[in-house]
Image (cartoon, helix red, strand yellow):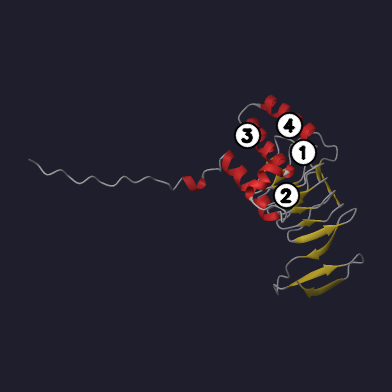
């Protein structure tokens, strides 16, 4: 009787999985976890999924965007219209929104169809990513990673907001915003640089007259 050869271990090539885009389920789970991390009033992720209107707005967008990208444009737009009536927010299914996106409260948020939003961004109620009247091509803002958009702020046109920038509440932004800065006002102006390039624990603050001071973070 011959000796049976030992079976070789079966290995699975997972090198390509790291580069695979996240699934719809994974995106929604990350959104819920990000909303929980940013909401001191929530006791659990379950609280977020059951009671947060902002999370429900984002979840509805994720599903509608998936349909839009998979050829179900009319259904996606119809569901987006229902979401607008139900939640009082309007996110176009064609908008491209990165991972771990949070809408706080969410009422009155408007995001146009050519808007692009990076990862780990936070928007508050009443914020708008709109256009200036251009009716072709890229006509809505692009936000980098880690951008915060304050309540009631309005960003118009095909502008770019750099990584880590903060848009103060009620600001009107019609020009590009540098990375790692805070802008406020109408029209918005830079009032704070988050990180000093030479010393990491200080920031540069600029007043209305263009004067700057270095102060501790």
Q: Which percent across, then down, holds residue 141?
A: 77, 45
Determine if residue 146 is in view.
no
**Which residue of the protein is positioned furthest toward the right in this rendering?**
209
Query: Alpha carbon of mark 1 to alpha carbon of mark 2: how far?
Result: 13 Å
Mark in the foreground, 1 or 4: 4
Which residue is label 4 attached to? 80
Disc with the residue nearer the chain's start (4 vs 2): 4
Residue corresponding to mark 1: 112
- From the viewer's perspective, tell me whether residue 199 is left or right of residue 176: left
Quarter the C terminus occupies: bottom right
Q: Earlier in the sequence, mark 1 or mark 3?
A: 3
Which residue is depicted at the point 80% across and 74% down?
Answer: 214
Q: Are marks 3 and 4 in contact (CB under 8 Å)?
A: no
> Element type at marker 3?
helix
Depth check, front residue: 73 or 56: 56
- Within 10 Å of disc 3 (Cα), the crowding (few <14, some 14-19, many 20+) is some
Which residue lies under the disc numbered 3? 66
Separation of disc 1 and disc 4 at Cα? 12 Å
Is label 4 or label 2 in front? 4
- Residue matched to label 2: 143
Tell me the element at label 1: loop
Q: Are marks 4 and 2 in contact (CB under 8 Å)?
A: no
Please say if 167 is above or below 27.
below
Q: CA distance from mark 1 to mark 3?
A: 16 Å
Task: Give the Cα separation between the discs numbered 4 and 2.
Answer: 22 Å
Residue 113 falls in which quadrant of the image?
Answer: top right
Q: Could one spot residue 121 in this view of the protein?
A: yes
Q: Quadrant of residue 156?
A: top right
Label 4 environment density (alpha carbons within 10 Å; few <14, some 14–19, many ≥20): many
> As rendered, which of 192 and 55 lies closer to the eye?
55
Q: Quadrant of residue 73?
A: top right
């Amino acid at each position: 009787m011959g000796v049976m050869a030992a079976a070789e271990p079966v290995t699975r090539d997972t090198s390509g999985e790291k580069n695979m885009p996240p699934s719809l389920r994974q995106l929604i789970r990350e959104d819920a976890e990000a909303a929980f991390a940013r909401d001191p009033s929530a006791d659990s992720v379950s609280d977020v999924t059951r009671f947060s209107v902002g999370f429900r707005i984002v979840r509805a967008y994720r599903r509608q965007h998936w349909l839009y990208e998979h050829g179900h444009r009319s259904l996606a737009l119809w569901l987006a219209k229902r979401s607008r009536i139900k939640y009082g927010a309007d996110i176009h299914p064609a908008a491209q929104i990165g991972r771990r996106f949070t809408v706080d409260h969410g009422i009155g948020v408007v995001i146009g169809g050519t808007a692009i939003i990076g990862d780990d961004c936070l928007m508050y109620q009443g914020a708008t990513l709109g256009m200036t009247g251009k009716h072709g091509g890229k006509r809505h803002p692009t936000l980098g990673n880690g951008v915060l958009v304050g309540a009631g702020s309005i960003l118009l046109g095909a502008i770019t907001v750099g990584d880590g920038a903060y848009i103060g509440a009620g600001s009107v932004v019609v020009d590009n915003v540098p990375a790692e800065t805070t802008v406020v006002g109408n029209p918005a102006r830079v009032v704070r640089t988050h990180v000093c390039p030479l010393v990491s624990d200080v920031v540069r603050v600029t007043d209305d007259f263009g004067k700057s001071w270095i102060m501790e973070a």
